[in-house]
Image (cartoon, grey):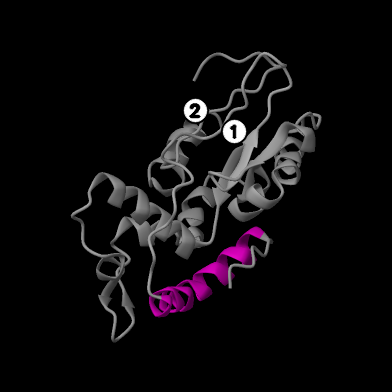
């Protein structure tokens, strides 16, 4: 991490931090005052999105259903598949809470980040202890991608949107498979809500 002055905030992002076992200890050893921001979304939707992205790079992988279950008839979900395991948020959070107090971790709703980006970013700015400078005027909805993009205030700069890999249509999944996965995740989600004191309404 670069050296940071008292008046500065340094941000760094990596999707794999939250689910990497060694990360909490390493970050704590670097700086125990670090504030952590985690974007979470419905774990079923997240798994489908993960699969869609992998499928675009490896079109010959097994079906989503085949990877999700060890035995679908018995409802045995395969938690060894990374796309499924990542969505066990309460499990991953345990490792972080061994090192960081809950007050140092802020959870962003991936769903609300799409429907109310200014509101979610307002809460992020409050958490970081900075004034709210990102507001509604900084966002516009990109119909092609299906989510908000950042509108820069400088007239000479083009708006900023996430890259080509983001916003692609998800593959169609059997609704019964989705229902089974919702049932699987329900107790894990409830445990997560209780731990963080926030109901993300994924049911």
Residue 193 belongs to magenta span: yes
Dot 1: what SS?
loop
Secondary structure mostly seen in magenta is: helix
View extreme (right): residue: 131
View extreme (front): residue: 144
Query: Could you say which is closer to the camera, residue 6 or residue 72?
Result: 72
Q: Are marks 1 and 2 in contact (CB under 8 Å)?
A: yes
Q: Which residue is mark 2?
A: 30
Residue shown at 79%/28% (left/top)?
Answer: 133
**Which x, y percent locates residue 172?**
39, 65
Query: Could you say which is closer to the camera, residue 58 or residue 24?
Result: 58
Q: Which residue is mark 1?
A: 34
View extreme (bottom): residue: 74
Q: CA distance from mark 1 to mark 2?
A: 9 Å
Residue shown at 59%/33% (left/top)?
Answer: 34
**Which x, y percent locates residue 23?**
42, 40
**Which x, y percent locates residue 177?**
38, 76
Question: Looking at the image, can residue 88 be seen?
Answer: yes
Q: Residues within 10 Å of mark 1 (few under 14, many from 20)?
A: some
Dot 2: what SS?
helix
Does 2 appear above or below 39?
above
Does 100 appear above or below 109?
above
Q: Classify residue 126 by image quadrant.
A: top right
**Which x, y percent locates residue 79?**
33, 66
Query: Could you say which disc has been placed on residue 58 in the image?
Result: none
Residue 45 belongs to magenta span: no
């Amino acid at each position: 991490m670069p050296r940071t002055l008292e008046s500065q905030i340094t941000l760094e992002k990596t999707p794999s931090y939250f689910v990497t076992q060694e990360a909490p200890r390493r970050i704590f050893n670097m700086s125990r005052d670090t504030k952590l921001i985690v974007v979470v979304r419905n774990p079923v939707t997240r798994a489908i999105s993960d699969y869609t992205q992998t499928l675009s790079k490896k079109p010959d992988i097994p079906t989503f259903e085949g990877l999700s279950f060890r035995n679908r008839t018995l409802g045995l979900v395969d938690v060894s598949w990374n796309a499924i395991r990542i969505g066990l948020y309460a499990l991953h959070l345990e490792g972080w809470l061994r090192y960081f107090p809950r007050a140092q971790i802020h959870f962003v709703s991936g769903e609300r980040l799409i429907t109310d980006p200014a509101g979610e970013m307002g809460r992020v700015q409050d958490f970081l202890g900075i004034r709210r400078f990102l507001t509604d005027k900084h966002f516009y909805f990109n119909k092609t991608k299906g989510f908000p993009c950042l509108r820069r205030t400088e007239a000479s700069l083009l708006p900023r949107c996430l890259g080509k890999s983001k916003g692609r249509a998800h593959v169609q999944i059997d609704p019964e498979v989705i229902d089974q996965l919702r049932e699987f995740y329900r107790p894990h989600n409830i445990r997560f809500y209780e731990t963080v004191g926030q109901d993300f309404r994924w049911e």
